[in-house]
Image: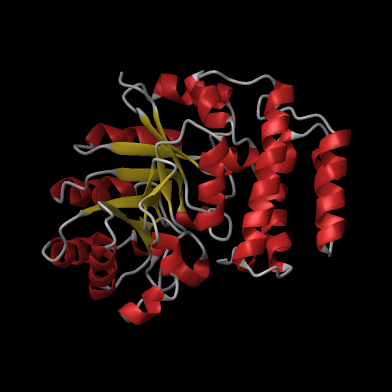
Protein backbone atom coordinates (compact mmCIF):
# COMPACT_ATOMS: atom_id res chain seq x y z
CA UNK A 1 0.00 0.00 0.00
CA UNK A 2 1.24 3.54 -0.73
CA UNK A 3 2.21 6.12 1.87
CA UNK A 4 -0.56 7.20 4.26
CA UNK A 5 -1.98 10.63 3.44
CA UNK A 6 -3.68 12.57 6.24
CA UNK A 7 -5.88 15.63 5.85
CA UNK A 8 -7.18 17.98 8.55
CA UNK A 9 -10.97 18.03 8.65
CA UNK A 10 -12.64 21.45 8.45
CA UNK A 11 -14.08 22.61 11.74
CA UNK A 12 -16.35 25.64 11.98
CA UNK A 13 -14.91 28.26 14.30
CA UNK A 14 -11.50 26.64 14.81
CA UNK A 15 -9.67 25.65 11.61
CA UNK A 16 -9.74 29.15 10.13
CA UNK A 17 -6.73 30.92 8.58
CA UNK A 18 -4.83 31.60 11.84
CA UNK A 19 -5.13 28.01 13.04
CA UNK A 20 -4.08 26.50 9.72
CA UNK A 21 -1.12 28.85 9.41
CA UNK A 22 0.18 28.34 12.94
CA UNK A 23 -0.55 24.61 12.99
CA UNK A 24 1.50 23.96 9.86
CA UNK A 25 4.33 26.08 11.27
CA UNK A 26 4.80 23.72 14.22
CA UNK A 27 3.44 20.33 13.16
CA UNK A 28 4.06 17.94 10.27
CA UNK A 29 2.26 14.98 8.80
CA UNK A 30 -0.79 16.62 7.20
CA UNK A 31 -1.07 16.61 3.40
CA UNK A 32 -4.24 18.68 2.96
CA UNK A 33 -6.17 21.35 4.84
CA UNK A 34 -9.79 22.42 4.34
CA UNK A 35 -11.45 25.74 5.04
CA UNK A 36 -14.60 25.82 7.16
CA UNK A 37 -17.49 25.80 4.69
CA UNK A 38 -18.62 28.84 2.74
CA UNK A 39 -22.37 29.31 2.26
CA UNK A 40 -24.88 32.02 1.41
CA UNK A 41 -22.84 33.26 -1.54
CA UNK A 42 -25.53 34.86 -3.66
CA UNK A 43 -23.08 37.38 -5.09
CA UNK A 44 -19.33 37.53 -5.56
CA UNK A 45 -19.34 40.64 -3.35
CA UNK A 46 -20.70 38.53 -0.49
CA UNK A 47 -17.92 36.02 -1.03
CA UNK A 48 -15.24 38.71 -0.95
CA UNK A 49 -16.19 39.61 2.64
CA UNK A 50 -14.60 36.31 3.69
CA UNK A 51 -11.88 36.36 1.07
CA UNK A 52 -9.16 36.49 3.73
CA UNK A 53 -9.75 32.75 4.17
CA UNK A 54 -8.66 32.32 0.56
CA UNK A 55 -5.64 34.62 0.42
CA UNK A 56 -3.23 31.73 -0.08
CA UNK A 57 -3.49 28.31 -1.70
CA UNK A 58 -1.01 26.63 0.67
CA UNK A 59 -0.11 27.02 4.34
CA UNK A 60 3.61 26.36 4.81
CA UNK A 61 3.59 24.17 1.67
CA UNK A 62 0.47 22.23 2.71
CA UNK A 63 -2.35 22.38 0.14
CA UNK A 64 -5.53 24.23 1.13
CA UNK A 65 -8.93 23.14 -0.21
CA UNK A 66 -11.83 25.62 -0.01
CA UNK A 67 -15.18 24.07 0.93
CA UNK A 68 -18.72 25.03 -0.16
CA UNK A 69 -22.02 24.12 1.50
CA UNK A 70 -24.88 24.57 -0.96
CA UNK A 71 -27.63 22.93 -2.99
CA UNK A 72 -27.64 25.79 -5.52
CA UNK A 73 -25.77 24.93 -8.73
CA UNK A 74 -25.17 28.57 -9.59
CA UNK A 75 -23.78 29.30 -6.14
CA UNK A 76 -21.40 26.35 -6.38
CA UNK A 77 -20.27 27.42 -9.85
CA UNK A 78 -19.72 31.00 -8.63
CA UNK A 79 -17.61 29.78 -5.71
CA UNK A 80 -15.56 27.25 -7.67
CA UNK A 81 -14.77 29.71 -10.44
CA UNK A 82 -13.82 32.38 -7.90
CA UNK A 83 -11.43 29.91 -6.27
CA UNK A 84 -10.06 29.09 -9.72
CA UNK A 85 -9.13 32.75 -10.21
CA UNK A 86 -7.32 32.68 -6.85
CA UNK A 87 -5.14 29.79 -7.99
CA UNK A 88 -6.86 26.86 -6.27
CA UNK A 89 -6.89 23.51 -8.08
CA UNK A 90 -9.69 21.87 -6.07
CA UNK A 91 -12.87 22.79 -4.20
CA UNK A 92 -14.74 20.47 -1.84
CA UNK A 93 -18.53 20.16 -1.79
CA UNK A 94 -19.84 19.59 1.74
CA UNK A 95 -22.53 16.89 1.78
CA UNK A 96 -21.75 15.92 5.36
CA UNK A 97 -22.82 18.68 7.75
CA UNK A 98 -25.36 16.98 10.06
CA UNK A 99 -26.87 19.91 11.95
CA UNK A 100 -30.67 20.22 11.55
CA UNK A 101 -30.62 23.92 10.64
CA UNK A 102 -28.55 22.90 7.60
CA UNK A 103 -29.92 19.42 6.84
CA UNK A 104 -33.57 20.48 7.01
CA UNK A 105 -32.93 22.69 3.97
CA UNK A 106 -31.53 19.77 1.94
CA UNK A 107 -28.01 21.02 2.45
CA UNK A 108 -25.06 19.13 3.89
CA UNK A 109 -26.05 15.58 4.82
CA UNK A 110 -29.71 16.56 4.37
CA UNK A 111 -29.34 16.18 0.59
CA UNK A 112 -28.07 12.60 0.77
CA UNK A 113 -31.55 10.97 0.56
CA UNK A 114 -31.96 12.70 -2.83
CA UNK A 115 -29.37 11.16 -5.18
CA UNK A 116 -31.16 12.45 -8.28
CA UNK A 117 -30.86 16.01 -7.00
CA UNK A 118 -27.14 15.45 -6.44
CA UNK A 119 -26.85 14.04 -9.97
CA UNK A 120 -28.67 17.07 -11.38
CA UNK A 121 -26.39 19.50 -9.53
CA UNK A 122 -23.23 17.69 -10.59
CA UNK A 123 -24.40 17.60 -14.21
CA UNK A 124 -24.84 21.38 -14.23
CA UNK A 125 -21.75 22.25 -12.24
CA UNK A 126 -19.27 20.00 -14.04
CA UNK A 127 -20.07 21.73 -17.35
CA UNK A 128 -19.13 25.14 -15.96
CA UNK A 129 -15.94 24.58 -13.95
CA UNK A 130 -12.32 23.89 -14.84
CA UNK A 131 -10.90 22.61 -11.54
CA UNK A 132 -11.63 19.53 -9.43
CA UNK A 133 -14.77 19.27 -7.30
CA UNK A 134 -14.22 16.71 -4.55
CA UNK A 135 -16.95 15.68 -2.10
CA UNK A 136 -17.19 15.12 1.64
CA UNK A 137 -20.27 13.23 2.80
CA UNK A 138 -21.71 10.83 5.36
CA UNK A 139 -23.01 7.31 4.80
CA UNK A 140 -26.47 8.80 4.52
CA UNK A 141 -28.86 10.99 6.44
CA UNK A 142 -31.56 8.59 7.67
CA UNK A 143 -29.84 5.29 6.85
CA UNK A 144 -26.32 3.99 6.31
CA UNK A 145 -27.65 2.16 3.25
CA UNK A 146 -28.13 5.42 1.36
CA UNK A 147 -24.43 5.44 0.48
CA UNK A 148 -24.83 2.44 -1.83
CA UNK A 149 -27.09 4.39 -4.21
CA UNK A 150 -24.97 7.51 -3.81
CA UNK A 151 -21.83 5.63 -4.84
CA UNK A 152 -23.39 5.03 -8.27
CA UNK A 153 -23.68 8.79 -8.72
CA UNK A 154 -20.20 9.55 -7.41
CA UNK A 155 -18.68 6.85 -9.63
CA UNK A 156 -20.63 8.10 -12.64
CA UNK A 157 -19.16 11.59 -12.30
CA UNK A 158 -15.68 10.29 -11.48
CA UNK A 159 -15.46 12.44 -8.36
CA UNK A 160 -11.70 13.01 -7.94
CA UNK A 161 -11.80 12.30 -4.20
CA UNK A 162 -14.65 11.22 -1.92
CA UNK A 163 -14.33 11.62 1.84
CA UNK A 164 -16.87 9.61 3.83
CA UNK A 165 -17.55 10.22 7.50
CA UNK A 166 -18.69 6.84 8.80
CA UNK A 167 -21.85 8.07 10.52
CA UNK A 168 -25.29 9.09 9.27
CA UNK A 169 -26.62 12.61 9.51
CA UNK A 170 -29.27 12.08 12.18
CA UNK A 171 -26.58 10.83 14.56
CA UNK A 172 -24.79 14.18 14.59
CA UNK A 173 -21.70 12.97 16.48
CA UNK A 174 -23.54 10.61 18.82
CA UNK A 175 -23.08 6.88 18.95
CA UNK A 176 -20.56 4.76 17.13
CA UNK A 177 -19.39 4.70 13.55
CA UNK A 178 -20.89 2.36 10.91
CA UNK A 179 -17.63 0.64 10.07
CA UNK A 180 -19.12 -2.26 8.11
CA UNK A 181 -21.31 0.10 6.08
CA UNK A 182 -18.22 2.10 5.14
CA UNK A 183 -16.41 -1.09 4.15
CA UNK A 184 -19.35 -2.15 1.97
CA UNK A 185 -19.41 1.24 0.25
CA UNK A 186 -15.68 1.02 -0.34
CA UNK A 187 -16.15 -2.24 -2.26
CA UNK A 188 -18.30 -0.41 -4.83
CA UNK A 189 -15.99 2.60 -5.22
CA UNK A 190 -14.29 3.26 -8.54
CA UNK A 191 -12.85 6.54 -7.27
CA UNK A 192 -10.35 7.49 -4.51
CA UNK A 193 -11.99 7.29 -1.07
CA UNK A 194 -10.90 8.95 2.18
CA UNK A 195 -11.92 7.54 5.56
CA UNK A 196 -13.16 9.96 8.25
CA UNK A 197 -14.50 9.24 11.73
CA UNK A 198 -13.27 8.54 15.29
CA UNK A 199 -9.53 8.40 14.74
CA UNK A 200 -8.31 9.61 18.13
CA UNK A 201 -5.14 7.58 18.65
CA UNK A 202 -2.49 5.57 16.85
CA UNK A 203 -4.06 2.41 18.27
CA UNK A 204 -7.44 3.23 16.71
CA UNK A 205 -5.81 4.16 13.41
CA UNK A 206 -3.90 0.89 13.26
CA UNK A 207 -7.00 -1.15 14.08
CA UNK A 208 -9.00 0.57 11.34
CA UNK A 209 -6.22 0.54 8.75
CA UNK A 210 -5.72 -3.20 9.18
CA UNK A 211 -9.40 -3.74 8.36
CA UNK A 212 -9.38 -1.18 5.55
CA UNK A 213 -6.08 -2.16 4.00
CA UNK A 214 -6.96 -0.60 0.64
CA UNK A 215 -7.39 2.86 2.20
CA UNK A 216 -4.35 5.13 2.22
CA UNK A 217 -6.18 8.46 2.64
CA UNK A 218 -7.49 9.54 6.03
CA UNK A 219 -9.17 12.69 7.31
CA UNK A 220 -8.80 13.48 11.01
CA UNK A 221 -10.77 16.17 12.84
CA UNK A 222 -11.38 16.07 16.58
CA UNK A 223 -8.51 13.64 17.14
CA UNK A 224 -6.05 16.14 15.70
CA UNK A 225 -7.50 18.99 17.76
CA UNK A 226 -6.92 16.86 20.85
CA UNK A 227 -3.38 15.88 19.88
CA UNK A 228 -1.72 17.92 17.11
CA UNK A 229 1.09 15.36 16.96
CA UNK A 230 -1.28 12.56 15.94
CA UNK A 231 -0.40 12.67 12.20
CA UNK A 232 3.33 12.17 12.79
CA UNK A 233 2.61 9.52 15.42
CA UNK A 234 0.61 7.65 12.80
CA UNK A 235 3.41 7.96 10.26
CA UNK A 236 6.02 7.20 12.99
CA UNK A 237 8.05 10.13 11.73
CA UNK A 238 10.62 11.53 14.20
CA UNK A 239 8.25 11.81 17.15
CA UNK A 240 9.53 14.18 19.88
CA UNK A 241 9.50 12.95 23.48
CA UNK A 242 6.67 14.16 25.73
CA UNK A 243 8.68 17.03 27.24
CA UNK A 244 9.58 18.34 23.80
CA UNK A 245 5.97 17.89 22.65
CA UNK A 246 4.82 20.03 25.57
CA UNK A 247 7.40 22.69 24.70
CA UNK A 248 6.16 22.79 21.10
CA UNK A 249 2.53 22.93 22.24
CA UNK A 250 3.41 25.88 24.48
CA UNK A 251 4.82 27.81 21.51
CA UNK A 252 1.88 26.74 19.33
CA UNK A 253 -0.85 27.98 21.69
CA UNK A 254 1.04 31.23 22.30
CA UNK A 255 1.47 32.00 18.60
CA UNK A 256 -2.11 31.00 17.84
CA UNK A 257 -3.48 33.20 20.62
CA UNK A 258 -1.51 36.18 19.31
CA UNK A 259 -2.66 35.46 15.75
CA UNK A 260 -6.30 35.45 16.85
CA UNK A 261 -5.81 38.68 18.81
CA UNK A 262 -4.40 40.27 15.68
CA UNK A 263 -7.23 38.94 13.52
CA UNK A 264 -9.92 40.21 15.91
CA UNK A 265 -8.20 43.56 16.59
CA UNK A 266 -7.65 42.60 20.23
CA UNK A 267 -11.27 41.75 20.93
CA UNK A 268 -12.05 39.22 23.66
CA UNK A 269 -13.52 37.01 20.94
CA UNK A 270 -9.99 35.67 20.50
CA UNK A 271 -10.18 34.08 23.97
CA UNK A 272 -13.47 32.39 23.04
CA UNK A 273 -11.83 30.80 20.01
CA UNK A 274 -8.91 29.57 22.11
CA UNK A 275 -11.36 28.10 24.63
CA UNK A 276 -12.95 26.09 21.81
CA UNK A 277 -9.55 24.61 20.99
CA UNK A 278 -8.70 23.97 24.64
CA UNK A 279 -12.00 22.10 25.05
CA UNK A 280 -10.37 19.44 22.86
CA UNK A 281 -6.68 19.78 23.63
CA UNK A 282 -7.23 19.50 27.39
CA UNK A 283 -7.67 15.74 26.84
CA UNK A 284 -3.98 15.46 26.05
CA UNK A 285 -3.11 16.64 29.58
CA UNK A 286 -2.95 14.64 32.80
CA UNK A 287 -6.13 16.13 34.30
CA UNK A 288 -8.36 17.24 31.41
CA UNK A 289 -11.24 18.58 33.48
CA UNK A 290 -9.06 20.73 35.73
CA UNK A 291 -7.11 21.97 32.73
CA UNK A 292 -10.19 23.11 30.87
CA UNK A 293 -11.79 24.50 34.02
CA UNK A 294 -8.79 26.81 34.44
CA UNK A 295 -9.08 28.04 30.86
CA UNK A 296 -12.86 28.19 30.65
CA UNK A 297 -13.42 30.61 33.54
CA UNK A 298 -11.03 33.28 32.21
CA UNK A 299 -12.60 36.54 31.06
CA UNK A 300 -9.67 38.85 30.31
CA UNK A 301 -6.42 38.54 28.40
CA UNK A 302 -4.40 38.61 31.64
CA UNK A 303 -6.53 35.87 33.20
CA UNK A 304 -6.23 33.71 30.10
CA UNK A 305 -2.46 34.11 29.85
CA UNK A 306 -2.04 33.30 33.55
CA UNK A 307 -4.27 30.22 33.26
CA UNK A 308 -2.32 28.88 30.27
CA UNK A 309 0.98 29.42 32.06
CA UNK A 310 -0.32 27.55 35.12
CA UNK A 311 -1.67 24.68 33.03
CA UNK A 312 1.62 24.23 31.21
CA UNK A 313 3.63 24.29 34.44
CA UNK A 314 1.33 22.14 36.61
CA UNK A 315 0.00 19.38 34.33
CA UNK A 316 1.70 16.68 32.30
CA UNK A 317 1.34 16.47 28.54
CA UNK A 318 0.30 12.90 27.70
CA UNK A 319 -0.86 13.27 24.11
CA UNK A 320 -3.45 10.91 22.63
CA UNK A 321 -1.81 7.67 23.78
CA UNK A 322 -3.83 7.62 27.01
CA UNK A 323 -7.09 7.94 25.01
CA UNK A 324 -8.71 10.30 27.52
CA UNK A 325 -11.03 11.96 25.02
CA UNK A 326 -14.71 11.05 25.59
CA UNK A 327 -16.13 10.35 22.14
CA UNK A 328 -19.62 11.37 23.23
CA UNK A 329 -18.45 14.95 23.86
CA UNK A 330 -20.78 16.32 21.17
CA UNK A 331 -23.84 14.42 22.31
CA UNK A 332 -25.33 17.49 23.99
CA UNK A 333 -23.43 20.28 22.25
CA UNK A 334 -25.72 22.88 20.72
CA UNK A 335 -25.03 23.58 17.07
CA UNK A 336 -24.96 27.32 17.77
CA UNK A 337 -21.68 26.84 19.63
CA UNK A 338 -19.99 26.26 16.29
CA UNK A 339 -19.66 29.73 14.85
CA UNK A 340 -17.43 31.13 12.16
CA UNK A 341 -14.64 33.43 13.22
Residue at the spot x=39%, y=40% of the render?
61
Depth check, front residue: 96 or 284: 284
Q: How is the image coloured?
A: secondary structure
Query: Quick check: 303 left or right of 119?
Result: right
Instruction: Give the percent coordinates (x, y) of residue 181.
Output: 38, 38
Residue at 68%, 37% in the rendered image: 249
Residue 273 percent across, percent down from the top left: 66, 59
Instruction: Answer with left or right where residue 133 lies relative to residue 234.
Output: left
Please tell me which residue is depicted at 77% across the width and 34% down the height of the picture: 285
- Residue 241's place in the image compared with 330, above or below, is above
- In the figure, residue 131 lies in which quadrant? bottom left
Q: Residue at x 56, y 46 (%)?
A: 22
Asked if residue 302 shows in the view, the reply is yes
In x, y percent, where is residue 200? Answer: 59, 33
Where's the C terminus, which quadrant?
bottom right
In this view of the protein, which residue sits in the foreground, 77 or 96? 77
- Asked whether 9 or 206 is in front, the reply is 9
Quadrant hosting residue 299 = bottom right
Q: Is residue 229 above or below residue 157?
A: above
Quarter of the image where the N terminus is located: top left
Residue 172 in sight: no
Reply above or below: 216 against 106.
above
Numbered circles on residues, count:
0
Residue 330: % across, % down:
64, 52
Amino acid sequence: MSETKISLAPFQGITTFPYRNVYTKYFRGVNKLYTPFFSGIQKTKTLEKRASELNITHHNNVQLIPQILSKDSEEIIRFVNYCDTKGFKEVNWNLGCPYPRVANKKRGSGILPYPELIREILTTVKQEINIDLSIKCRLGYHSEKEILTLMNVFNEFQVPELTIHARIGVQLYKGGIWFNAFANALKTAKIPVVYNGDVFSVKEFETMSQKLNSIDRWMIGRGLLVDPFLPIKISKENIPDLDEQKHIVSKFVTDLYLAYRKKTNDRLQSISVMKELWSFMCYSFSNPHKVFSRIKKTKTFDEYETAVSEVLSEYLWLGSDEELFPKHIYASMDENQLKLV
